[in-house]
Image (spheres, rainbow, N blue to C red):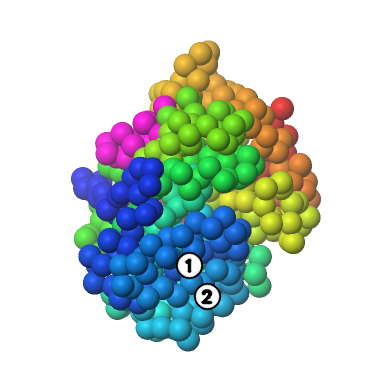
Amino acid sequence: MTETVFTYAAPALKFGSGSSAEVGHDLVGFGARRVLLVTDPGVAATGHPARIAEQVAAHGLTVTTYDAARVEPTDESLAHAIAFARDGGPFDAILAVGGGSAIDTAKAVNLLTTNPGELMDYINAPVGRARAPQQPLLPLVAIPTTTGTGSESTTICVLDVLSLKVKTGISHPALRPRLAVVDPDLTLTQPAMVTAAAGMDILCHALESYTARWYADFDAKRPEQRVPYCGANPIADMWSERALSLLAGAFRSAVRDGSDAAAREQMALAATFAGLGFGNAGVHVPHANAYPIAGRVRTFRPAGYPQDEPIVPHGMAVSLTAPEAFRFTFDAAPERHLHAARLLDPDAAGDGPDVLPAVLARLMRDIGIPNGLAEVGYGEADVDDLVEGALKQQRLLATAPKPVTGEDLAAVFRGSMEHW
């Protein structure tokens, strides 16, 4: 018997210029008195978290700030944040101000200050034990300062497990923020490469959820078996298509001129819409591949990011195999791949598997994304390790529109060494 039910969930949303100034009122409405604000050093340097903390305190709340969240969190960095929160608590609510890394750090802190155990108890199988939380989590309000990750809408916390050199995650509906506050003004300080990499994350969220396996093609599930990623469905499709249309008009402009307020607002809307889509439909091959690409980085240090250690930012890692991944999945849903290509580029010609990859490659080149895996330090000798890491992401690969083998992934990685 095949599935007949799909699910949809999302946080409450407040969107618009200046919306971040209202969060104190919202926290009072949640009954909070002691709030933990989670951010990272780079975002803290912009002054946004301090301003928001002052505005929250003006409502009579006590705010404690943790400003050491790591860009691309690790099990070690999350353990540090959790220890800080346990020592400084108890808190009534958590407020995340930053990109996906800060928001994901706040999700982990929320989970491990309200539930017993350690990170590995909750990390997705087969890396961790995939335990579900037993106790309610605190209200989490997420204020993104980058346009891309969609973490303010999702049930997922992504991290690197350093000892295993693998990027993985924790996924449970309880992790979803109670409220997402999207203030486009906060993204005006994003460097160009951060805008490009985070924007490719938006793009791949929309494309992967739109081309995911259709929800009714899965085997029927019992209620207790349902997971947040249920496959492509009519509601997620609507958000993904709209996100792609917004990106077509705003992405290049936002990278070229970070002060373009109209482009920034459209990017923020696109990120929000894509998050509402993929947070329910799911993502697949490009995101599965991104985990080992980011987790096994050696020397690459992109402009606009902290230079103290190597990093392949998440959105960049997702994009690097996207053209080849969508070439691979084309035959599972040709009409969807072609429609997506023409939403991004109405002038895209042709009707074969190369159309969407060509649209993506042109965009990546225009916004300064590296020209494939070779440019970030990978080669043929790394393919087996990359495949091994991607195969561990079965939660994501299960959402692909066709079965994915190790040989398939190896072909995608090899074809992604250079795109133009």
Where 392 falls versus 162 (above or below)? above
The image shows residue 174 at horizontal and vertical percentages of 32, 66
Q: Name the residue at 26% across, 49% down.
A: 8
Residue at the front extreme of this rendering: 58
In terms of sequence position, does the residue under pointer 1 or pointer 2 come before the other?
A: 1
Which type of secondary structure does the marked residue at label 2 adopt? helix
Magenta range: 228-245
The image shows residue 364 at horizontal and vertical percentages of 63, 32
Quarter of the figure with residue 165: bottom right
Asked whether the residues under the numbered discs 1 and 2 touch, taking CB atoms below 8 Å apart as contact, a structural biologist would say yes
Where 24 falls versus 286 (above or below)? below
The image shows residue 208 at horizontal and vertical percentages of 45, 40
Specify the amino acid type for callout 1: Val
Specify the amino acid type for callout 2: Ala
Q: Name the residue at 68% across, 34% down.
A: 368
Q: Name the residue at 46% across, 60% down.
A: 51
Residue nearest the viewer, comparing 329 with 100: 100
The image shows residue 320 at horizontal and vertical percentages of 63, 41
Q: In the displayed structure, does residue 104 sit left or right of residue 162?
A: left
Q: In the displayed structure, does residue 334 sit left or right of residue 58?
A: right
- Marks counted in the figure total 2
Which type of secondary structure does the marked residue at label 1 adopt? strand
Q: Which of marks 1 and 2 is in front?
A: 1
Quarter of the figure with residue 86: bottom left
Image quadrant occupied by the C terminus: top right
According to the picture, the residue beneath numbered tag 2 turns out to be 81
Q: Name the residue at 52% across, 75% down.
A: 81
According to the picture, the residue beneath numbered tag 1 turns out to be 38
Residue 70 seen in the figure:
yes
Quarter of the figure with residue 276: top left
